[in-house]
Each structure stands twice: as structure tokens, then as C-alpha cells.
Image (spheres, coloured by chain):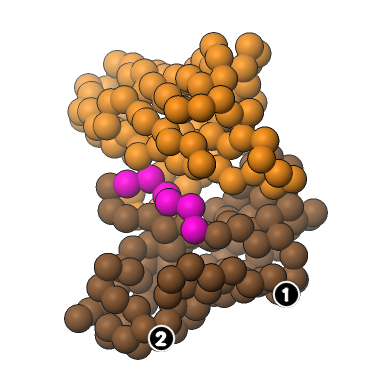
């Protein structure tokens, strides 16, 4: 059974304080690992797809990396508008299995 | 990327009634999915909506409770039948195309359902 575990569950940062979110996974036949951002009352917004170990992708203050067992979402110099829940999901076949998410709060 | 809309955005319903949620995609997508997100929790897949055939349900979800239709490549409906307060949740649809070996799923804004 595919499993995805995200840590920490919640993270409070000061504006400008860089940190990383973790996504550990076990899956048979990984086709891709996805990161989404979800704001309260909205659907998940796609951020990145990573396909193989060693791959990295960047978008503004976010950088996602992938190993054979986990993925990290690095947030550099975050701003209050980066506050959201960040979801990690793995794909085997056509379906996504989601982790529990990390709720990020960035204080000015 | 696909833009997905859902109707209604929210509803408050009485127990024992049914609600049908509509999902519209702005372009043809190969796959459409329905998820449930309970308060403070992550997403759980309910079923894959298959065009022209019966939906494929995940463990714990049955067709009598969550009938799904998908008449074409851009539209699907999910009905929550004989509702109870435990069905209070956000229901999300998603779609993915055929752009590559691993297709990104794009999500609608969700339907927030409260059952009294």
C-alpha cells in the first residue's frame, strides 16, 4: 500500500526565516511526486512534479528536491503570502495518494 | 493547464436528502477524479470518473452512496445520496490530460457541504 507522510504538521516562521518541509513516501512504481499549495477554502494549486531521484525544480522562493525515499520543499526567505497548507502526493498508476499536509504560517 | 469549475460552491442540506455536484473542465481531459477532504484532513480519492462507463470506486466508497456520471470529456457529476452529518466535507474534482508520462491533476475549487 502506498504511503505518504509529511512533517512537520505545522510550521511557524518569521518572514525571511528559511526552512524545509519533508515528504517521506513508500510506493510501488513511482511515476511522479507532486507538490501542491492549498489556501483555506480553495482547491489545491499545482506547484511541481518530480519524476526521478536527484531532480530539482524551482519557482520563486520554493525549491523541490527528490530522493528515492523522500522529497523536500525548501522555502527561502518566506513572505506572509507563502502561508498555506502544502500537500505532497505520489502517483502510481493513475491515482494520487496524498500526505496529510504541512500547514505553514509566516509572520511579518 | 486545465481550469476546473464546480457547482455549487457550498450548500447546507438536511439529512436523508441528496446533492449533485457538477464539475466542468475548460478543455478535454482524459481522466477525471472525485476526492473528499474532511475538515482539517488531506484528500481521499472517492472514485475515477470514466467516460461512457461506470466509475471506478476506491475502498470504502460505493456507487449507491456516491453515484458518478461522466457523459463527455469535459463534464462530470458526483451525487452524495441519503446524506448524514458524517458526509459534511469538501468535495473536489480534478482532471488530467495526456501531456506526458505522468499527468498533472488540476483541481477545482471544491464544494463545501454541510449536512444538518
Q: Nearer the viewer, residue A35 or B42?
A: A35
On the picture, is A53 further left or further right than A95? right
Q: Quadrant of residue B47?
A: top right
On the picture, is B71 further left or further right than B14? right
Q: Secondary structure at mark 2?
A: loop
Q: Is residue A17 visible?
A: yes
Residue A18: numbered disc? 2
On the picture, is A68 further left or further right than B11? right
Which region of the structure is painted magenta?
A42-47
Number of residues whose C-alpha sits closer than 10 Å to that of mark 2, classed few (under 14), some (14–19) or many (20 or more) = some
> What x and y, as percent, mark residue A98?
55, 53
Asked if B33 appears above or below B81 in the picture, the reply is: below
Q: Nearer the viewer, residue A42 or B12?
A: A42
Q: Earlier in the sequence, mark 2 or mark 1?
A: 2
Colour of chain B in the rendered structure image: orange
Q: Please give the name of the residue rendered at 42% of the width and 25% of the height, measured from the top-left corner.
A: B23
- Residue named by callout 1: A54
Q: Chain of mark 1?
A: A
> What x and y, as percent, mark residue B20?
36, 18
**Residue B50 lies in the magenta-colored region:** no
Q: Please give the name of the residue rendered at 42% of the width and 24% of the height, measured from the top-left corner.
A: B24
Colour of chain A in the rendered structure image: brown
Amino acid at each position: 500500500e502506498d504511503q505518504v507522510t509529511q512533517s512537520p504538521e505545522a510550521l511557524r516562521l518569521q518572514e525571511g526565516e528559511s526552512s524545509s518541509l519533508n515528504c517521506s513516501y513508500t510506493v510501488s512504481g513511482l511515476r511522479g511526486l507532486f507538490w501542491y499549495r492549498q489556501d483555506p477554502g480553495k482547491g489545491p494549486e499545482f506547484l511541481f512534479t518530480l519524476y526521478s531521484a536527484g531532480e530539482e525544480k524551482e519557482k520563486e522562493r520554493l525549491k523541490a528536491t527528490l530522493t528515492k525515499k523522500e522529497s523536500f520543499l525548501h522555502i527561502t526567505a518566506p513572505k506572509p503570502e507563502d502561508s498555506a497548507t502544502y500537500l505532497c502526493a505520489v502517483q502510481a498508476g493513475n491515482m494520487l495518494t496524498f500526505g496529510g499536509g504541512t500547514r505553514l504560517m509566516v509572520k511579518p | 493547464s486545465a481550469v476546473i469549475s464546480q457547482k455549487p460552491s457550498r450548500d447546507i442540506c438536511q439529512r436523508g436528502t441528496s446533492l449533485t455536484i457538477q464539475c466542468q473542465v475548460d478543455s478535454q481531459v482524459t481522466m477525471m477524479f472525485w476526492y473528499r477532504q474532511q475538515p482539517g484532513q488531506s484528500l481521499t480519492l472517492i472514485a475515477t470518473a470514466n467516460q461512457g462507463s461506470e466509475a471506478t470506486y476506491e475502498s470504502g466508497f460505493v456507487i449507491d452512496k456516491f453515484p458518478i456520471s461522466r457523459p463527455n470529456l469535459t463534464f462530470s457529476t458526483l451525487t452524495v445520496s441519503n446524506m448524514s452529518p458524517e458526509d459534511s466535507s469538501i468535495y473536489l474534482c480534478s482532471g488530467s490530460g495526456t501531456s506526458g508520462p505522468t499527468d498533472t491533476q488540476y483541481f477545482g475549487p471544491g464544494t463545501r457541504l454541510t449536512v444538518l
